[in-house]
Amino acid sequence: HQVFRIVPKDDAQLALVRVLEDILDLELDFWRWVTPVDVRVPSHSLQVVKSYLENHRIKYFTMIKDLQALLDEEQRQMKSVASAGNSDSFDYTNYHTLSEIYSFQDMLVAENPKLVSKMVIGQSYEGRLLNVLKFSTGGSNRPAIWIDTGIHAREWVSPASGIVFAKKIVTEYGTDSALTEILNKMDIFLEMVVNPDGYHFTHTDNRMWRKNRKQNRDSRCVGVDLNRNWNAGFGGHGSSNNPCSEIYRGTRAHSEPEVKSIVNFVKSHGNIKAFISIHSYSQMLLFPYGYTKKPAKDQDELDQVAQKAITDLASLYGTSYRYGSIITTIYQSSGGSIDWTYNQGIKYSYTFELRDTGHFGFILPANQIVPTANETWLALKVIMDHTFKNPY
Amino acid sequence: MGLRRAIVLVALMEVTWSLNVTTVGPKTVSTDASAHPEPAEENTEQKEAATAEEDVMATGELNPNHYPAQRAAKVVQHYLNTRYGSPYKLFGLKQVHSGNAEEVADSGRKYQLEISVHEIISNTQEKCSAEVFFPSGAKQLSPQVQVSACEEILKLDAKSEDEALYQQYKTNKTVRTEERLPDSHGHIDPEMTPFWHLSIVASSFIMLKESTENTLYNVAQVANITQLATENEQLKFDCHVLLHDMVSQEIPQWKLLFTWSPAEGVKVLHTEQLPHIHEREKQAKPN
């Protein structure tokens, strides 16, 4: 259904519009009769009404192109305010606050105690807990896959997708044969909000915040770019030594607690076989390196897996991704997480840049969260499956 | 010069050379006792590798999926929006099919591109050929763009919708909003959507002018838009926009004064860049 706003220029035109009201078959629903005239037009009457108005040279324009979508959106917004009691009534189609995400984590653990547990790997600069969900069917220190979302605060679709991934894991274990096989032999670790201080700040103060909330010494500027703080090419081109820069690298590699916690976790675990970091936007699947043009020694394999992954991703909605090394595909960047993990020996190290390509950018409409997460999940499964089938 | 002086000079140069090698970048040795000390040596190598690979701009046939062709193609998008954009007609870059870059004497670099352009509102696509010239030199001049072979998409008719909007806001209504477009959740009131599009078109003049081979601009958000009195049959607007440069990851903020009518398109009267958000943030929170 569309809503037209009709602008009759005189009484004669207004009379012509009134004629429409009497044609019951059109099922028009006039919302207001004071000029301009607003009328809801069901889809079966659209063509007739348009032709009629145009033939009589009566000015009009489409005020609401899709009424149903508006109503759905309103429902969505109302739903998000009401808090969910369980992960089935949780609203995956909306963005959530940090506390809602942390509540979701606890709900998921409570509902799936045999499969999911929560670990705290450290604390953020402002003292928030850094939670990691562990999905495991048993064993001891099994080879594992790491997925992280929310390292850059403003990239909201990233943690929003992380929530969907978590739900997918618990839903598909036992029903999806590929995922079940993987989880029977490997563990999955998921850190949903790598940068909780920054994420909180995007809700309270500045939607465009990127970095963490570190008070930099001797500077009026706050924050370190957590994806320039890793010890891989640290300090090189593609990061800044200026605390006011969005890509400020910090005082030294691993200076930031949010990064250090993951470094400690990865090193002490010692058996992580894939490390995947989720960002937005640009629609890309990237592999090392970012800090140097020297190709990764596994470049060919990483390239092939990436190609399969984005092909599967596109199969759902036709969303097209580019893929390649960071430095050739997007830009030179030093101190990035997957360069560090790759150099630690974690071969399947990938970064995703989710939807879109700039039209909405960081502020992706909430109704795209689930489609984005669903298509990305297919790509993740390709990487996880390849990791599982190619032990090293 | 005497032999001794020569030796001293050589010695000095050697010292200077080694100083250059080791003092680039910040200290990397961890002072945290519990931490595993990061190998500083490995890091210096990595750093040197990185500095040695400074921006040597790609020339000749370009990989269409890599950033040099992509950045040049984005400039074409901004150009098309400045020339043909309207409340109901907005262009996006769909794909880069091929690209070529060459140095032009001492004046700059020229890209030749085959791209697919997307009209977002009607959701139609067309292939275009384009040429983008980035002038070199100390004074930052804006890139020059030429487009050919995509007349269909540029002629796409949004006239009745543009005209209806124009008539309505010329005399009857006035738009003014302090609400961000879109809001934090990506939502935008349908009545405001054409003005969001108009702001993107106006911003494209800035994005075009500011673009270089080392930038990739998109509009991040419109902070507010106010309609002023209609002047010479042109609707007139004042808006505040947040841009995003993918390469630096910065969010430059601009204020723009612009006019629009279906006949004349968008014309930008005045632009002003606002101070960096970090400084303003500190001023706003005095503790």
Image (cartoon, coloured by chain):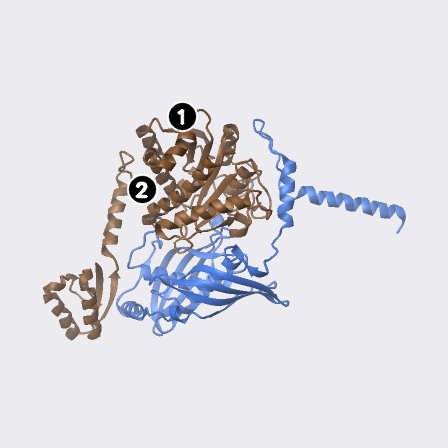
Q: Give the quadrant of the N terminus of chain A.
A: bottom left
Q: Position of residue B135 (x, y in %)?
A: 57, 65
Q: Which chain is brown?
A: A
Q: Position of residue A318 (x, y in %)?
A: 37, 53
Inspect the image, locate mark 2, and give the three-letter code of the amino acid beneath it: Tyr
Q: Is residue B190 left or right of residue A223?
A: left
> Which one is in front, A308 or A188?
A308
Q: Chain of mark 1?
A: A
Identify the element where label 2 is drawn: loop
Residue identifier under label 2: A92
Q: Chain of mark 2?
A: A
Q: Which mark, by number, is residue A138?
A: 1
Residue at 26% of width from left, 67% of height from top?
Answer: B172
Figure colour of chain B: blue
Q: Position of residue B78 (x, y in %)?
A: 45, 63
List the single residue furthest toward the top: A140
Residue A18, quarter of picture? bottom left
Q: Position of residue A382 (x, y in %)?
A: 42, 42
Gap in angstroms between the C-alphas marked 1 and 2? 28 Å
Q: Residues within 10 Å of mark 2 (few under 14, many from 20)?
A: many
Marks 1 & 2, CB-CB < 8 Å contact: no
- The answer to whether one can see residue B263 in this image is yes
Q: Residues within 10 Å of mark 1 (few under 14, many from 20)?
A: some
Residue A205, quarter of picture? top left
Identify the element where label 1 is drawn: loop
- The answer to whether one can see residue A363 in this image is no
Q: Is residue A345 left or right of residue A91?
A: right
